[in-house]
Image (spheres, helix red, strand yellow):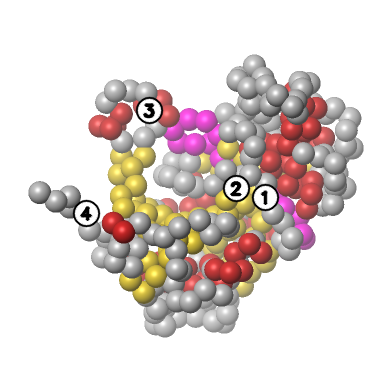
Amino acid sequence: MQTPQFLHPLDPLPTPSTSSGPSPSGGSQPLSGTLGGFSMERQEQDKWCWAAVSVSVAHFYGTSGWSQCTLAADELHLDCCSADGPVRGNSGCNRAWYLDSPLSRVGHLARISWSFEGFPNVQNEINASQPFCARIAWNGGGAHFVAVGGWSIDPIGTEFVDIYDPYYGFIQTPHASFLSAYRSSGDSWTHSYFTVAVGSPAGGGPAPTSNSPKSE
Amino acid sequence: MGLSRPQGPSGGPAVLGRFVPHLIGRGPDALRPVRGAPALRVSQPIRIYTVKLSDIRDKNFYAKSVRTGWRYFIDANGPVAVADLNEVGVGGGPQLSVVWSEDGS
């Protein structure tokens, strides 16, 4: 695939200015942290961000045996892996759901926080090799779950987060933007889900945390 | 009469030039070919419009859409990412987010 002709001409990417000064830490080298080996599955249904995020976290920690449809089936008590295809519609498998419950079911929920997290907490979790997840409430309505898998600080001090999005893919954005303007202004990071290698017991049919939100 | 394309912000490419070289070294293994690509190029931008979900079925939805920024394609012998530059970001300045293609398309 080529970049469409109407977007030509293609110009060389400008060279960064060298007059921007050193980073706040006093050095000129960027600082960063990342989760080695983390990858995000694409959500198999348009409302299965919660399933894709949970399964991706499980696979990162080496927990096998879960797929998006098996997790959805266990969460929703429906046949979501039928050869005829998942049951669709709001009364079927393809529906907005919680994230704490499926993360707990796969065995990797540590805790849920009813807010966004500051950049130091992002750094702490990633540096501890623990992906954590975020709920984004869209400005226009609805919500979405993503995972945070990295951070970096550029030479002039801008703090970036690496977002593994089961719908959009891999996105890098300033932490300040992720708080309140993920894809457009007004999108709001409302909840955080901390994970751990060995967390809540898997397979026990956990209930969502009281008052935890869905992806809607 | 030909179609005219709106000019993007004069400082847009400079913002991309400031951030993209820092960001390109990170991310999934699938992006390795991009990291080793020849010099990156940037396309001419297109406008981004946003419309609320509650308005999308409105027959006047176009009138309710809001200009929110500009989208550039990052090219390395084909598009490898889109960079969205919002005009007014947190703190009043422009903000950039980069969505990388992991399959080269």
Q: Which mark is residue B6?
A: 4
Q: Tell which subunit mark 1 falls on.
A: A
**Left or right: residue A185 compared with residue B10:** right
Amino acid type, callout 1 = Met
Between B98 and A186, the one nearer to me in the picture: B98
Q: Are marks 2 and 1 in contact (CB under 8 Å)?
A: yes
Amino acid type, callout 3 = Ile
**Left or right: residue A194 compared with residue A12:** right
Between B32 and B8, the one nearer to me in the picture: B32
For marks 3 and 4, give the CA distance.
24 Å
Residue A5 in the image: above or below residue A195 = below
For marks 2 and 1, give the CA distance.
7 Å
Which segment is the magenta one? A127-143
**Left or right: residue B68 compared with residue A53:** left
Residue at figure coordinates x 54%, y 47% from the top left? A168
Q: Earlier in the sequence, mark 3 or mark 4?
A: 4
Residue at figure coordinates x 41%, y 77% from the top left? A16
Q: Position of residue A106 (x, y in %)?
A: 82, 39
Badge 3: residue crowd in 10 Å (few <14, some 14–19, many ≥20): some
Amino acid type, callout 4 = Pro
- Image quarter of residue A98: top right
For marks 1 and 3, give the CA distance.
29 Å
For marks 1 and 4, give the CA distance.
36 Å
Q: Across the whole image, how many numbered discs are drawn on residues?
A: 4
Look at mark 1 in the image and give the residue it sits on: A40
Q: Tell which subunit mark 4 falls on.
A: B
Query: Is any atom of residue A62 visible in this view?
Result: yes
**Secondary element at tag 2:** strand
Q: Are marks 1 and 4 in contact (CB under 8 Å)?
A: no
**Secondary element at tag 4:** loop
Look at mark 3 in the image and give the residue it sits on: B56
**Is residue A103 within the magenta segment?**
no
